[in-house]
Image (spheres, helix red, strand yellow):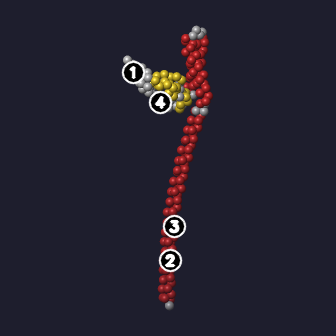
Amino acid sequence: MSEKKNEINSKTETNHRRAKTTERKSRVKSLSQQNAKLKEEVEFYKDKWLRAVAEFENFRKRNAKERIDWIRNANQTLLLEIVDIFEHLELAIKSAKNEKVPANYKKCIKMIYDQMKQILEKQGLKKIETIGNEFNPNLHDAIICVEHEKYDENIVFDNIKNGYLLNDKVLRHARVAVSKGKKKNAK
Protein backbone atom coordinates (compact mmCIF):
# COMPACT_ATOMS: atom_id res chain seq x y z
CA MET A 1 0.00 0.00 0.00
CA SER A 2 2.74 2.28 0.68
CA GLU A 3 3.91 1.80 -2.86
CA LYS A 4 0.50 2.69 -4.14
CA LYS A 5 0.46 5.70 -1.88
CA ASN A 6 3.81 6.75 -3.17
CA GLU A 7 2.70 6.21 -6.71
CA ILE A 8 -0.50 8.20 -6.13
CA ASN A 9 1.46 10.91 -4.37
CA SER A 10 3.94 10.92 -7.23
CA LYS A 11 1.17 11.19 -9.84
CA THR A 12 -0.58 13.86 -7.83
CA GLU A 13 2.67 15.72 -7.48
CA THR A 14 3.37 15.39 -11.20
CA ASN A 15 -0.12 16.57 -12.05
CA HIS A 16 0.29 19.38 -9.60
CA ARG A 17 3.64 20.35 -11.18
CA ARG A 18 2.12 20.19 -14.66
CA ALA A 19 -0.76 22.35 -13.54
CA LYS A 20 1.65 24.85 -12.02
CA THR A 21 3.80 24.81 -15.17
CA THR A 22 0.74 25.31 -17.36
CA GLU A 23 -0.42 28.07 -15.05
CA ARG A 24 3.02 29.70 -15.17
CA LYS A 25 3.14 29.44 -18.96
CA SER A 26 -0.31 30.91 -19.22
CA ARG A 27 0.67 33.69 -16.81
CA VAL A 28 3.91 34.36 -18.75
CA LYS A 29 1.92 34.50 -21.98
CA SER A 30 -0.60 36.86 -20.39
CA LEU A 31 2.19 39.07 -19.01
CA SER A 32 3.94 39.06 -22.40
CA GLN A 33 0.73 40.20 -24.06
CA GLN A 34 0.24 42.89 -21.42
CA ASN A 35 3.87 43.95 -21.88
CA ALA A 36 3.40 44.20 -25.67
CA LYS A 37 0.21 46.24 -25.17
CA LEU A 38 1.98 48.53 -22.71
CA LYS A 39 4.89 48.99 -25.13
CA GLU A 40 2.44 49.94 -27.88
CA GLU A 41 0.73 52.35 -25.51
CA VAL A 42 4.07 53.85 -24.48
CA GLU A 43 4.99 54.37 -28.16
CA PHE A 44 1.58 55.92 -28.85
CA TYR A 45 1.87 58.39 -25.97
CA LYS A 46 5.53 59.06 -26.70
CA ASP A 47 4.60 59.94 -30.29
CA LYS A 48 1.77 62.19 -29.07
CA TRP A 49 4.11 63.86 -26.59
CA LEU A 50 6.79 64.45 -29.26
CA ARG A 51 4.20 65.93 -31.61
CA ALA A 52 2.86 68.18 -28.86
CA VAL A 53 6.39 69.35 -28.00
CA ALA A 54 7.14 70.05 -31.68
CA GLU A 55 3.82 71.84 -32.13
CA PHE A 56 4.46 73.97 -29.05
CA GLU A 57 7.98 74.82 -30.26
CA ASN A 58 6.56 75.89 -33.65
CA PHE A 59 3.90 77.96 -31.87
CA ARG A 60 6.55 79.61 -29.69
CA LYS A 61 8.73 80.48 -32.72
CA ARG A 62 5.74 81.74 -34.71
CA ASN A 63 4.53 83.81 -31.77
CA ALA A 64 7.99 85.33 -31.25
CA LYS A 65 8.23 86.20 -34.96
CA GLU A 66 4.76 87.77 -34.94
CA ARG A 67 5.65 89.77 -31.84
CA ILE A 68 8.86 91.04 -33.47
CA ASP A 69 6.96 91.94 -36.66
CA TRP A 70 4.28 93.68 -34.64
CA ILE A 71 6.87 95.72 -32.74
CA ARG A 72 8.79 96.56 -35.92
CA ASN A 73 5.65 97.72 -37.70
CA ALA A 74 3.80 99.27 -34.75
CA ASN A 75 4.70 102.79 -35.83
CA GLN A 76 3.25 102.60 -39.34
CA THR A 77 0.64 105.31 -38.87
CA LEU A 78 3.09 107.67 -37.23
CA LEU A 79 5.72 107.04 -39.90
CA LEU A 80 3.18 107.72 -42.66
CA GLU A 81 2.50 111.15 -41.16
CA ILE A 82 6.21 111.84 -40.69
CA VAL A 83 6.87 110.84 -44.31
CA ASP A 84 4.59 113.67 -45.43
CA ILE A 85 6.60 116.16 -43.37
CA PHE A 86 9.82 114.64 -44.73
CA GLU A 87 8.60 115.14 -48.28
CA HIS A 88 7.69 118.76 -47.49
CA LEU A 89 11.28 119.28 -46.32
CA GLU A 90 12.43 117.75 -49.60
CA LEU A 91 10.28 120.26 -51.51
CA ALA A 92 11.61 123.10 -49.35
CA ILE A 93 15.18 122.13 -50.26
CA LYS A 94 14.33 122.02 -53.96
CA SER A 95 12.55 125.38 -53.90
CA ALA A 96 15.31 126.97 -51.81
CA LYS A 97 17.74 126.31 -54.66
CA ASN A 98 15.59 128.37 -57.03
CA GLU A 99 14.58 131.13 -54.62
CA LYS A 100 16.62 133.82 -52.95
CA VAL A 101 16.82 132.16 -49.57
CA PRO A 102 19.59 133.02 -47.09
CA ALA A 103 22.34 130.37 -46.96
CA ASN A 104 21.90 129.73 -43.23
CA TYR A 105 18.20 128.82 -43.78
CA LYS A 106 19.14 126.47 -46.60
CA LYS A 107 21.78 124.85 -44.40
CA CYS A 108 19.32 124.50 -41.49
CA ILE A 109 16.62 122.92 -43.67
CA LYS A 110 19.21 120.53 -45.17
CA MET A 111 20.43 119.52 -41.68
CA ILE A 112 16.88 118.80 -40.49
CA TYR A 113 16.18 116.85 -43.69
CA ASP A 114 19.37 114.75 -43.31
CA GLN A 115 18.65 114.02 -39.66
CA MET A 116 15.06 113.04 -40.39
CA LYS A 117 16.17 110.84 -43.29
CA GLN A 118 18.66 109.08 -41.02
CA ILE A 119 15.99 108.47 -38.35
CA LEU A 120 13.50 107.11 -40.89
CA GLU A 121 16.10 104.77 -42.42
CA LYS A 122 17.04 103.58 -38.93
CA GLN A 123 13.37 102.67 -38.39
CA GLY A 124 13.47 100.50 -41.54
CA LEU A 125 11.94 102.96 -44.02
CA LYS A 126 13.16 102.81 -47.64
CA LYS A 127 12.03 104.77 -50.67
CA ILE A 128 10.70 102.63 -53.52
CA GLU A 129 12.78 103.06 -56.67
CA THR A 130 10.54 103.87 -59.60
CA ILE A 131 11.82 105.65 -62.72
CA GLY A 132 13.27 103.26 -65.30
CA ASN A 133 12.01 100.16 -63.47
CA GLU A 134 9.31 97.82 -64.67
CA PHE A 135 5.83 98.55 -63.30
CA ASN A 136 5.09 96.31 -60.31
CA PRO A 137 1.49 96.41 -59.00
CA ASN A 138 2.75 95.26 -55.59
CA LEU A 139 4.84 98.44 -55.27
CA HIS A 140 3.30 100.97 -57.66
CA ASP A 141 -0.08 102.58 -58.33
CA ALA A 142 -0.33 103.56 -62.00
CA ILE A 143 -1.90 106.99 -62.18
CA ILE A 144 -1.41 107.44 -65.91
CA CYS A 145 -0.41 105.16 -68.77
CA VAL A 146 0.72 106.87 -72.01
CA GLU A 147 3.15 106.39 -74.88
CA HIS A 148 6.64 107.74 -74.22
CA GLU A 149 9.49 108.41 -76.64
CA LYS A 150 12.23 107.02 -74.34
CA TYR A 151 10.67 104.13 -72.45
CA ASP A 152 9.44 100.71 -73.53
CA GLU A 153 6.08 99.27 -72.59
CA ASN A 154 5.34 98.76 -68.88
CA ILE A 155 8.30 100.89 -67.71
CA VAL A 156 7.81 103.66 -65.13
CA PHE A 157 8.83 107.04 -66.60
CA ASP A 158 7.66 109.45 -63.89
CA ASN A 159 7.27 109.38 -60.13
CA ILE A 160 4.17 111.36 -59.12
CA LYS A 161 4.32 110.54 -55.39
CA ASN A 162 7.01 108.60 -53.57
CA GLY A 163 6.27 105.16 -52.19
CA TYR A 164 7.94 103.61 -49.17
CA LEU A 165 8.76 100.21 -47.71
CA LEU A 166 8.81 99.66 -43.97
CA ASN A 167 10.92 96.62 -43.07
CA ASP A 168 10.43 95.30 -46.62
CA LYS A 169 6.62 95.66 -46.47
CA VAL A 170 4.80 98.31 -48.48
CA LEU A 171 3.96 101.28 -46.28
CA ARG A 172 2.72 103.42 -49.17
CA HIS A 173 2.58 102.53 -52.87
CA ALA A 174 4.48 104.80 -55.25
CA ARG A 175 2.16 106.69 -57.59
CA VAL A 176 3.69 106.56 -61.04
CA ALA A 177 3.25 107.22 -64.73
CA VAL A 178 3.79 104.14 -66.90
CA SER A 179 4.76 103.92 -70.57
CA LYS A 180 2.51 102.12 -73.06
CA GLY A 181 5.52 101.85 -75.32
CA LYS A 182 7.56 104.15 -77.49
CA LYS A 183 5.72 106.86 -79.43
CA LYS A 184 5.35 106.19 -83.10
CA ASN A 185 6.16 109.27 -85.18
CA ALA A 186 3.09 110.41 -87.09
CA LYS A 187 3.87 111.33 -90.72
Of the numbered discs 1 and 2, the one sitting upstream in the chain is 2
> Mark 2 Cα within 10 Å, few/some/many (few <14, many 20+)?
few
Residue where numbered disc 2 is placed: 19
Q: How many marks?
A: 4
Q: Secondary structure at mark 3?
A: helix
Mark 3 or mark 2: which is in front? 3
Q: Nearer the viewer, residue 54 or 138?
A: 138
Residue 87: image location, x then y, percent: 57, 21
Q: Nearer the viewer, residue 29 or 17?
A: 29
Residue that appears at 57% across and 41% down? 63
Q: Secondary structure at mark 4?
A: loop
Mark 1 or mark 2: which is in front? 1
Gap in angstroms between the C-alphas marked 3 and 1: 93 Å
Gap in angstroms between the C-alphas marked 1 and 2: 109 Å
Residue where numbered disc 3 is placed: 31
Residue 100 in which image quadrant: top right
Gap in angstroms between the C-alphas marked 1 and 4: 25 Å
